[in-house]
Amino acid sequence: MSQVTNDPWTFSTNSLPSDPRLMTTVANGYLGTRIFGDVLHVNGLYNGAVGDCHRADVPSPLSVRLCATKEEIVDESFSLSIKTGTFSHILQCSSFTATQQIFAHRSHSHLLVNIITLKRTGESSPVSLNLQTEMKVESQDLELHIGHTFHEAQYIYGNILVPEVESCPRKSIHMIWNAVPQSLVLETELEKSWVFLTAVSESEKDVKEKFVEGQALSDEGQLYLSHEKAWDELWMGSCIDIESSLDLKPIIYGCLYYLLSSLPPLGSTDEFHGISPGGLSNGSRNEDYWGHVFWDQDTWIYPNILLFYPEMAAHILKYRIRTLSGAGENAKQQGYKGAKFPWESALTGYEVCPEKIYGEQEIHINGDVLVAFKQYYHMTKDLDLFASAGGWDVVNAIAEYWCSRVIWNTEEQCYHVNGVMPPDEYHSVDNSIYTNALVQTSLQFAMDLAGELKKNVPDLWKDIANKIKLPYDSKMNYHPEYDGYTIGEKVKQADVVLLGYPMMFQMTTEQRKNDLEIYESVTDVDGPAMTWSMFAIGWMELKKAQVAQDQLKKCFANITEPFKIWTENADGSGAVNFLTGIGGFLQAILFGYTGFRITDKSLKFDPIFPDDVKKLCIKGICYLGNKLDFMFTRDIMTVELMSALKSQNYSLDVIIGEHETCLPLYIGKPVSFPTKAGCIKQRS
C-alpha cells in the first residue's frame, strides 16, 4: 500500500487493506459504519439477552463500489480526510473521473451520505459508470419489514429480536434510503453529482423528518458544506500541533478523529449510550467485545475528551447516570448495597459480560466510573450535574457499594476487599492495590461532594477511607499488586502503575520509580496497546524523557496503514479500531509531555521534552468555562486565554515556580515565561 500524500490531515492510498477489519470508519456518535462494509450500527441498538448481547447489525446502503474495467482505469486512489470526516474514492478513467464521497453527517447525526460525481475529461458522448452494491434487506439481529416508499426512497422498519433483559422493550429501527441504480450515466453535461441519502431513527415520524431535512440540505447545496462546517468547528475548538522528528502529527490527528467521531455533535440532545473499545462502527456478534462499554471509556478515552469538550464528557457521565438502575440490580444480585456498574455494559446497565468471572470480580469499574465524575467536577465546578441531574446518585451509590463490599480484618485492623480481579486479568486476588486505592478515592470524593451539596456524611465512609488496606512492601519500597504478589510474576497490562497517574495516589519519587521498574520488567510484551502509554507518563513524571519516549514508541506497532487503524495487540489480534489504545496514546501527549494534572483546586502543568520533540501546542483546553491555548518549548511556554463563558465567573491566573509568581490571564493577552512547573487557578 503506497501513500499518495504527505498531508497529515489526509490518509491516502492506491490500494485498500487486504484485511477488511483495517478499513477506515465513519461515525458521528449515533451512526457508524466501516467503509464498504455491508452493515451499519446505531448507538444503543443491541440484540441478544445478557451474555449474548451485541450490537445489532443493520443492512447498510453505503456498501457501494465504483466499477470500471481495468482497460478504462488510468489511476485509482482512496483517502480519508480527517479534517472533514469524509472518505473518498477517486477513479480516473480515460474519458471521465468518478469521485465517491462517504460520510456520517457531523451535525445531522441521523444521516449517512454517499455522493457520487462524474466529470467528463474526454469527448462529449455519454459516459456510463457501473455501481456494485452488496446491500440485502436482512439481518440476523432484526425482524425487518418493507414499508411503502417515501419520496421515491426505500423504507424498512423493525425491531431487535431479543431484548437485553426481559424488562427492556425490543428497540425499534426505521430506515429510509435512496436506492442505488446499477449504473450512472452522464449524458451531455460536463459534470453531475448524485446524492444517496440514508436516514435512521427509532420511529417512522422521526426518520421521515430526518430524511426530508437531508433532502432539503441537498437541494440547497448545503449537505456536505454543513457537515464540513461542523467538523471545522470541532477542530477550531480542539487541536494538538507538534514539531517532532517522529511523524507524530498524522497519528495524533487520526487519534483525535476516531475519538471525536465516536461522540455526539456539539449541542446534541439525543441520549448517548457510551463508547466501546472498537467504536461504533465495530462490535458485531463475536467481534470487538460485541460493542459493549468497559472501563476503557471512563479511564482511557474520557480524560482526553474532558480536557477539550466538557459538554461531550458530560454525555459519557449521563450514560452512567441513566444506567444506574441496572447497576443497582447488579449489586443486589451479588448481595450488596448501592450500585455495581457492569464490567461490560450495553443499554440498561445490567451486566452483559459473557464470562461470569469478569462481571463478578472486576469491580474496580466502580472506582473508574467515579474518578471520571470527580475529574469532571474539578475541571468544570458544574455542581448542577450532581445536585439535579443524577450525578450525586451515582457517587452515593458507589460509596454505599464499597461500604457493603469491604470486610473488617481483625488481625490486621483494617478493611479488606477480597475476591477481585484487578486490571491485571491474569490473577484473581485479595486486596488489589489499584482496587483498594479506588475505594479510598471514591469515598474521599463522596465526602467532599457531600459537603458541597450540604448532605450528611456517614461515619463509615470516613472510617473505611482511613483504614482500607493499601498493600505496600517497606523492604523493597514498592506497592505489591495484591496480597501475596511476588516480584517477577507476569502481569497482563498497566495496573499498579496507574496509581501515580491517573489516580495521583500519594507516594514518594522513589516508590514511583520502583513501581515502574518492577512492573515494566514483568508486563506482558504482547499485552494491549494502552499499557505502554501509562509507563511513558510515569517516566515523564520522573523526568526520564528518553526512557518515556522508548515506552511510547512501543505503541507504533499497533497502528496499521494506510488509515491509522489501531489494533488491540501488536500482532494484529484483538479489537479494532482500538479506541482504548488511542486514548492511552493521546493521554501520553496531553498529560505526559505537558504534565497536566486535574486537581480539586487547579490544573497543574509540568512540561517535559524528549530529544525528538521541539514544540507542542495544545489549543482549546477548557478549564472552569475558559478556553485556553498552551504553547510549550524546551525553554519558553506561553498560555493564552482565548474565551470565557459569561455565565461562569471564573477568572484565572497562572501560578509558576517555587515562589508562586502570579500572572493574571486576560483574553487576547498571552503570558510567556521560562518552561517550568506551575498551575492554572481560579483568581482569589
Image: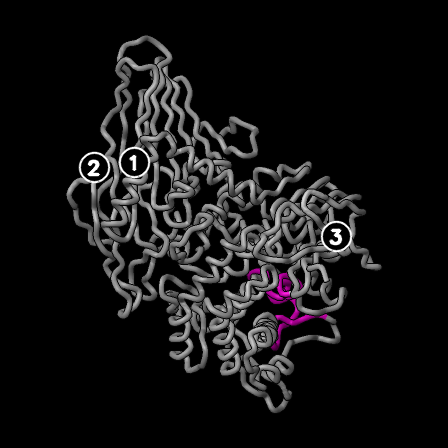
**Residue closest to the eye, 309 or 542:** 309
Please report contact status of discs 1 and 3: CB closer than 8 Å, yes or no: no
Q: Mark 1 against mark 3, which lies toward the viewer?
A: 3
Residue 61 painted magenta: no
Q: Residue at position x 72%, y 43% from top?
A: 669
Numbered circle sitting on residue 650: none
Between the C-alphas of marks 1 and 3, the distance is 50 Å
Residue 449 sits above or below residue 109 on the image: below
Q: Secondary structure at mark 3?
A: strand
Q: Position of residue 207 (x, y in %)?
A: 27, 47
Give the spatial CA distance, label 3 vs label 2: 59 Å
Which of these two is toward me, 492 or 182?
182
For label 3, the residue is 664
Quadrant of the frame with the C terminus: bottom right
Image position of 593 with respect to 489: above or below: above
Residue 13, x across and y down, in percent: 47, 30
Judging by the rendered image, the residue that carries numbered circle 2 is: 151
At 24% from the left and 49% from the top, the residue drawn is: 205
Residue type at mark 1? Answer: Gln
- Report the Cα–Cα distance between label 1 and label 2: 10 Å
Q: Residue furthest right?
A: 659
Pick whichever, 150 or 499, lies toward us.
150
The residues colored magenta run: 478-503
